[in-house]
Structures are given as C-alpha cells and as structure tokens.
Amino acid sequence: MAEAAGQATTNRKTGSPWVGRSIPRVEDSALLTGNGRFIDDLGIRPGTLHAAFLRSPHAHADIASIDLSSAKQAPGVVAILVGEDVKALTSSLVVGVKAPVECWPIAIGRVRYVGEPVAIVVASDRYLAEDAVDLIDVGYEVKPAVVDPVHALAPGAPVLHDGFPGNVASDRTFRYGEPEQAFASAPHRISIDVRYPRNSCTPIETYGVVAEYEPGEDAYDVLANFQGPFSIHAVLSRALKVPGNRLRLRTPPDSGGSFGVKQGVFPYIVLVAAAARAAGRPVKWIEDRLEHLTASVSATNRAITLAAAVDHDGRILALDWDQVEDCGAHLRAPEPATLYRMHGNLNGAYDIHHLKVRNRVVVTNKTPTGLNRGFGGPQVYFALERLVQRISVELGLDPLDVITRNLVPADAFPYRTASGALLDSGN
C-alpha cells in the first residue's frame, strides 16, 4: 500500500512529483461551454413513456385501500403499478443481515416513512403522469411512528417489521485484547454520550433512470446516474429476476454530483424497470427536487456511548463503544455498511490495544439510509475526538498533550489496529 501510494503521487514517465503541479482538467471544456451530457440531456427512444410516483404523506400507516379507477381513465396513462404489481414482477431487495424480513422498493400493505412510493404511474409525458397521480385515492390507517433510535428500542415502541423484534435488525458484540482488565485496573473511566445527527449531501442533479425491457431476451437495459454500477449490478439483477448477463446497466457521460447519495437510486431502478416491463415500452423518470429532499437517502444518525479507561497522564488504555445505528425504515444494501466501514479503525489515530464494542442496528420511521461522503467516518471520529477532549477537561490536562501522548508513534508503521485494520503509513 505504501509503495502504491508513493507511485500514485509521482509521474511514472518523468519521475517528477504530481503534488504541487497544475494538472490540465480534460473535462472542463464541455462543462464550461454547456456541452456536458447528463442523464436528462440524452436522447430517448421514440415512444418512451414517463413515470411519476405517488408517495406516502404518513410516516407509518397501513394501506387500507387504493382506488385507481379514476387515474386509469386519465389522459395518456398507460400503466399504474402498486405494491402487489411490483411484487409479482420482482424479488425482495437484499437485506444486509440475517433476518426474516423482506425489503421492497415500494410500499406493500404498509408505509413506513414519509415519501415512500405507494404507486408508480406511467404515461405519455410527465405532466399527464403527475395529473393521474393526483387522482389516486388511498385509504390510510395511521399508526404511531418512532423516529429516535433509542426510543425505538424501548418496550412498547411501534414495531416496523415483524422480522425485527423490538426494531433491532442486528445486535453484535466484539472484544479485542483485554478490555475488561484494562477498565478494572485503570484509575479513571471517562465516558460521553453523543447523538450524531443525520446529514445529507444534495447534488445539483437528482436521481434519474431510463429503463427498457426486451421480452424476447427476458433482459433489461437501464441507464441510471449512480457512478458505481458494478457495485449494485448483482443486487439489481437478483431483484429483477434475471441473470447478470441479462441486465445492462449504463451511466451517463457526466454526473451532476453525487457524494455517494446517488447510490440510493437503485430501488427506483427496480421500480422503473418493472414499469417498463408492465407497459411494454421504455420508461423514463427524473426525480424532482421536492422528491429528493423528501425521500432520498441520508447518512445514518447514531446514538453513541463511548467510554475510555485512562491512566493519570491521559493515556487511553481501552475503549468501550456502544453504538445504536438508525438505518431508517428499511435496511437496504449496502447497509449496515456505514456502521461497519470503520470497524477496523475504532481507535482512530490513537495507539489503543483493547476494545469492547456493541453494535445495534435499528429501524425507525425515517427514510432509508445510504452512502454519504466519508460514510461511517464522521460518526466514529466525532465521538472519539469529543472523548479525547473530555479526558483533557476532566484530568485538567492540555488537550494537545493528550492527543500527542496517544497518537500511534511515527516509527510504528505499518501499524495493525486492535480490530484488524492495517495503517500503512502516517506521522
């Protein structure tokens, strides 16, 4: 890793460093002259239809009835799909834990967050599709909602999924070194409680999907604007019930930003592809700004209790992490990746040899979570650095002294952390 990093910062042809040089940006000309090719700039096949979604106004409710009769008679409408229609054409999305829970990209029998799709209308243009959405009459039986991850654990809290008893999707514990012994012998135990909030990046370009189904081949061709198509290809082919070689997943030449958030487009790929199959024609959907602000993915919020075993001079001997991760209404791939991405480096930049960890993943009546810039890192490092600051306050020490006293020594690299990560270099 260290060698590869060194090569990456050096021009292999000349041997001169890249750092400090002005490198020509080959993409600027097209973007600055308005010739970028984003998903909504690209041409579509004649006869392509357009989709619009009916979304839940409630955080938690049973769907008592759906009347589509008026919407089906609306001008330009070709097809309307609700939960059972999508279920007949697709398979449940992959759930990232072992639990008897299905995860669909549309509400089936119950809505669990504001903005959850309830129906998808396909019409000759977006305007007519949205007009028909307004004609769908849904009867809801509103249920109590829970939006705080700690409250979701409480006895008597509203339960979102029968397969997640007490709203707990996963509860795992880990132990590295001898944390109990370190805490028992340390002169100080210092702890903090941290509530890390949700946060979101909001790219200029929203989600977009153009999907086509070829019945003769039982194959799909999909254009979508998440730049990591290979990472979700297997998830999507499974959901669409076709082998991987019968799903072509393409991306536009240019992207109007993502910061990880566009990973959350993949449930809509399933929905729009299913709609294309039902309608027998290509279907296009471009998310509007209100839809994105209402229902796109955010970073997870997390409730953390973090304790340290500390000696008199502020040296951290052990850490005890208790993390409650809020993944929203559904546990969608790759979650709970946000919680586990930093698992190998729960010690941060510090030389700490003993760790005790409890990770609980819960569901709440909020939008499902996904990737968001630096996913998993801020939640860990914010709590850890606040703890280091608290140690300096409680022991009356200089904060910088506490930091430097605990840092991994410069001559210790490559450094293997207690929970398994390899830090190849650093000072």
Image (tube, rainbow, N blue to C red):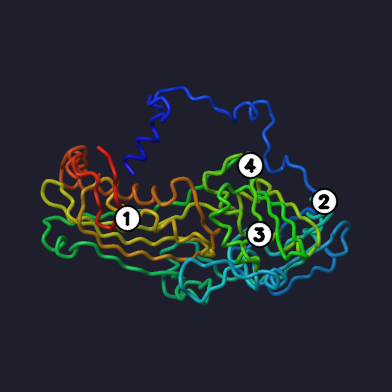
The three-letter amino acid code for the residue at tag 1 is Gly
- Whole-Å distance between the Cαs marked 2 and 4? 20 Å
- Whole-Å distance between the Cαs marked 1 and 3? 34 Å
Q: Quadrant of the N terminus?
A: top left
Q: How many marks?
A: 4
Question: To which residue does mark 2 refer?
Answer: 125
Is disc 2 placed on a helix, strand or loop? loop
Disc nearest the viewer among 1 and 3: 3
Q: Position of residue 321 (x, y in %)?
A: 29, 59
Is disc 3 placed on a helix, strand or loop? strand
- Whole-Å distance between the Cαs marked 3 and 4? 24 Å
The three-letter amino acid code for the residue at tag 4 is Glu
Q: Quadrant of residue 37?
A: top right
Question: To which residue does mark 3 refer?
Answer: 247
Question: To which residue does mark 4 refer?
Answer: 205
At x 16%, y 61%, the residue is 183
Mark 3 or mark 2: which comes first in sequence? 2
